[in-house]
Image (cartoon, rainbow, N blue to C red):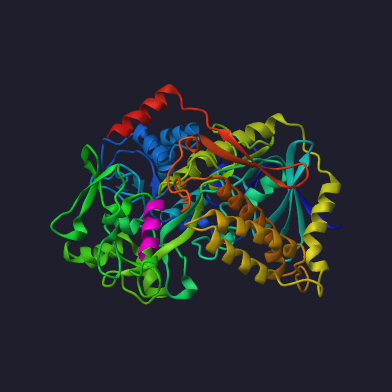
Amino acid sequence: MDYQTFEHDVLVIGAGGAGLRAAVEASAAGASVGLVCKSLLGKAHTVMAEGGMAAALGNVDDRDNWETHFADTMRGGQYLNNWRMAELHAREAPDRVRELEAWGAVFDRTRDGRILQRNFGGHKYPRLAHVGDRTGLEMIRTLQDHGVHQGIDVHMECTVVELLKDGERVVGAFGYDRERGRFRVFRANAVVLASGGIGRAFKVTSNSWEYTGDGQSLAYRAGAELIDMEFVQFHPTGMVWPPSVRGILVTEGVRGEGGVLRNSEGRRFLFDDIPELYRHQTADSEEEGWIYTQGDKNARRPPELLTRDHVARCIVREIKEGRGSPHGGVFLDIAWIKSKLPNGAEHIRKKLPSMYHQFKQLAGIDITETPMEVGPTTHYVMGGVRVDADSQMSTVPGLFAAGEVAGGLNGANRLGGNSLSDLLVFGKRAGEYAAAFAREQPAAAIDEGQVEAAARTALEPLDRQGSGEAPYQVQYELQDLMQNQVGIVRNDGELRGALEALQRLQERVKRVEAQGNREYNAGWHTALDLRNLMTVAEAVTRSAIERKESRGAHFREDHLGKDEEWGRTTLVIKQGDDGAMELRRETIPPPREDLQRIIDESQKT
């Protein structure tokens, strides 16, 4: 078999914010770094994270601090978070943001020149450092500009299909270049997974085509554990019209800048369902109504900035009860503030330039004049590869994970803006510890038998020409199944039906074929992606069946309340010796006393 071999100390799979930050840190530590990206460098899905990065800088409200950020993250995650990860994230995010600024990131500014911060869902104070509504793009630009001087080897348009091991230790990866279909073997003493999420397992998603659960599946097949896979976040606001752009993200920054959600009756329906933690205050104008944490009127916010799971379910309720917009969503209105501000239209265009152009070009709507139609879209998975909080190493030696592919930080629900600072904080840590691990290991040895087995598996769809079925139909049926039966609102009957259907689909996946040869073959790429999609779809479904309560992003209409015992339990998934998926419950250790005090104090206000 013909393949090309590349050797690195550290191999980073994924070139979004986490992957780039890990590569920069590992390279700065003296490691030779290879960076593999499924598409072109710069086209990472991180650019779609528009609203900002959460960090307790205290530039807009000096009451903010890391303790409050920690408490908000834990509350948003319904206390299923890995509390050590939540602590590290809250403590280190400000330094990571300032570091990005020192590397050239151009943030929006306060009047006195500091980094401007905006309100976002679930955060007590204005906390999101931002660049208009193009924050993710600025992060990628800055990290790439900084990283290009580090001597990092970049392998663009390359897909990894298997991790390679020497005993229990990961020592490299097997993949292929998407253009020509030529195989590549990467030998490395440490591997960092930074490949993002699983959104392409669902029909309506804000995620780009690369998000097929590659990292989660690679880790699972290599023997690593996955956690919290039942918690899939459906962002409340994605485009719903026209059909060709359905699911594309409408940043929470629209609501952070004053956008309000209304139903077809023109009513601000989120006031109908305010959680117990909050009080309701209606101003003279309904648009200016707000809620506040009990006992703290100064920490007020619009109800549109409640946590994403709550807002998404309220939108679904309005649609199901016949109060939705003409195309099956609700209305998001930012145009109302035009009459409140001098040069209001220009203010909207300045604060939300991407959203203005997105709706103008894709939907023919001027958001300074007309409300947008929006609805929930599959956006983020809170679960992922189980990692050590400090080092980001998985349960398999030599395999690290950072960003969305890693589980633990967000618990049952992620707060908006925590994702971008997560990439910086834990991307840095993964790169740092991967480089240290690589230095301590003997040179990696690649088993030719594993390489040949991976190649045979990859070529199977091409070998079946004329005897199988098209992968696109199987992928469509998988996405339709997950959207309808494992989506925002779940119940036991539909979940068990979905699991049975997945088992039938799995047999069909084994028979998919790809016409033609290995060059420029999108059908072959889809056939290989299906293997990963099936793994993450089964993990989500099995976990959702097991958790018999409603918590965070996991909502069971047959188990509406929270269960105290489940509030201390995480679900762990691992591949069994027989190749079947094994699931077990594990009790989450209680936080340190000092962190528990922070949590207790936050619950009093």
Q: Is residue 37 visible?
A: no
**x, y (%) of residue 224?**
67, 40
Magenta run includes residue 258: no
Instruction: Name the residue at 44% across, 37% down.
Output: 79
Instruction: Name the residue at 69% across, 63% down.
Output: 505
Locate the C terminus and report the quarter of the image it occupies. top left
- Is 455 or 375 nearer to us in this picture? 375
**Most frequent secondary structure within the magenta stretch:** helix
Q: Is 576 positioned to the left or the right of 303 in the image?
A: right
Number of disc labels: 0
Magenta run includes residue 312: yes
**x, y (%) of residue 520?**
70, 70
Instruction: Name the residue at 57% across, 61% down.
Output: 482
> Farthest residue toward the bottom?
364
Q: The magenta stretch spans which residues?
A: 309-318
Residue 127: quarter of image: top left
- In this rendering, the answer to whether 411 lies above or below 310 is above
Q: Is 356 positioned to the left or the right of 220 in the image?
A: left
> Farthest residue toward the top?
593
> Farthest residue toward the left?
284
**x, y (%) of residue 124?**
30, 42
Locate the N terminus and report the quarter of the image it occupies. bottom right
Instruction: Name the residue at 30% across, 36% down.
Output: 64
- Is 265 or 97 nearer to us in this picture? 265
- In this rendering, the answer to whether 60 lies above or below 232 is above
Q: Is residue 262 visible?
A: yes
**x, y (%) of residue 453?**
83, 52
Residue 358: quarter of image: bottom left
- In this rendering, the answer to whether 134 lies above or below 393 is below
